[in-house]
Image: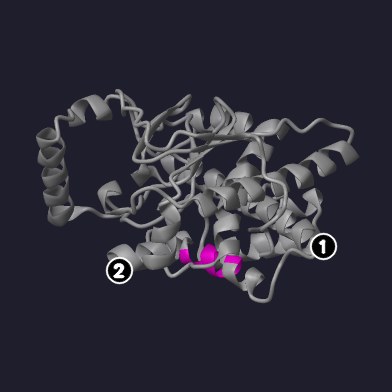
Amino acid sequence: MRWRGRRQSNNVEDLRGQGGGLGNSGLGRGGGFRIPVGGATGGGGISGIIILVVIFFALRACGIDPMEILSGGDPAGPGQSQVQPGDPATTSARPSDEMSQFVATVLAETEDVWNGIFQAEGRTYTEPSLVLFSNQVRSACGSASSASGPFYCPGDRKVYIDLAFYDQLARQFGAAGDFAQAYVLAHEVGHHVQNLTGVLPKFNQMRQQMSEVEANRMSTRVELQADCFAGIWGHFTDQKGLLEAGDLEEALNAANKIGDDTLQKKTQGYVVPDSFNHGTSAQRQKWFKRGFDSGKLADCDTFNNPI
């Protein structure tokens, strides 16, 4: 992706190195929408219990009360990642200045695209902020650690990311490349677009009356639409001549690597379709490519079309 020398967004808050404290809540049921990465979702068994016990005492040893964290409710919730990256302690130290410049540039490109689309429809696009943090952060959706992965919080209209996540994306999941990284950010901005258009508020209201399986199915449609919106951004970025050979393949590879079925096979050896809440690898690739090919909002209706 040809990003150097282009405008960087002013809507970036750099909180790296400032800590933040986890407080007494996680990202609750009405909280952030995340990119899913790693971990198990179905089953459990003795091995899962052992892991939980180890984590419990590890947190206690660090002076953190696990029960206090759990009191905030389900840390994932329908429409969010049920599987998280590894221990934040394994991530790299302070991300490079180049990486922060990169995401600020990608954010600026999303601003240009969505301002143009909203203006063409006679609407005003309210730009989201991007919060860079390290280790942990507090948002209007609750507190989160780097293990939460990138997420969008509708409550404060901000995207949150620990840039060390990109190292994990490449190293552990085989999704390297700058356009793969841009896809992750564009997906979270896609959730912001859903928030502005009323999709997220409606979903958060409806899922309170849904069973877990029903909420997961609706969440999948929400997430796939965000993938399609990311594809729309890619469409106009390509029209600007900013994409290089292999960029589209990088994004599609990333979409493949973080599909629910692929993640579950990787982490637990089998899949539990009723637990899917982001979409299969094939679905995520399909909807990103659909937005990329057309560049039209009307083609991203995941709620009234087969997914």
- Element type where label 1 sits in the image: helix
Give the camera-side residue of 63 and 94.
Answer: 94
**In the shown orientation, is residue 200 left or right of residue 85?**
right
How far across and down, in percent of the image, does residue 28 sit?
A: 41, 30
Magenta-colored segment: predominant secondary structure: helix
For the point 16% across and 44% down, the residue is 55
Eye-nearest disc, 1 or 2: 1
Whole-angstrom CA distance, mark 1 to mark 2, is 41 Å
Residue 243 sits in which quadrant? bottom right
Residue 38 sits in which quadrant? bottom left
For the point 34% across and 54% down, the residue is 92
**In the shown orientation, is residue 152 left or right of residue 28?**
right
Label 2 neighbour load within 10 Å: few <14, some 14-19, many 20+: few
Q: Which residue is mark 2?
A: 269
- Quarter of the image that includes the N terminus: bottom right
Residue 198 makes an appearance in the image: no
Give the camera-side residue of 228 and 303.
Answer: 228
How far across and down, in percent of the image, does residue 68 sit?
A: 23, 24
Q: Which residue is mark 1?
A: 239
How far across and down, in percent of the image, does residue 100 sit?
A: 53, 48
Q: Which residues are magenta?
A: 251-257
Give the camera-side residue of 27 and 219.
Answer: 27
Against 282, residue 114 (above or below) is: above
Q: Amino acid at mark 1?
A: Gln
Against 223, residue 280 (above or below) is: below
**In the shown orientation, is residue 21 left or right of residue 204?**
left
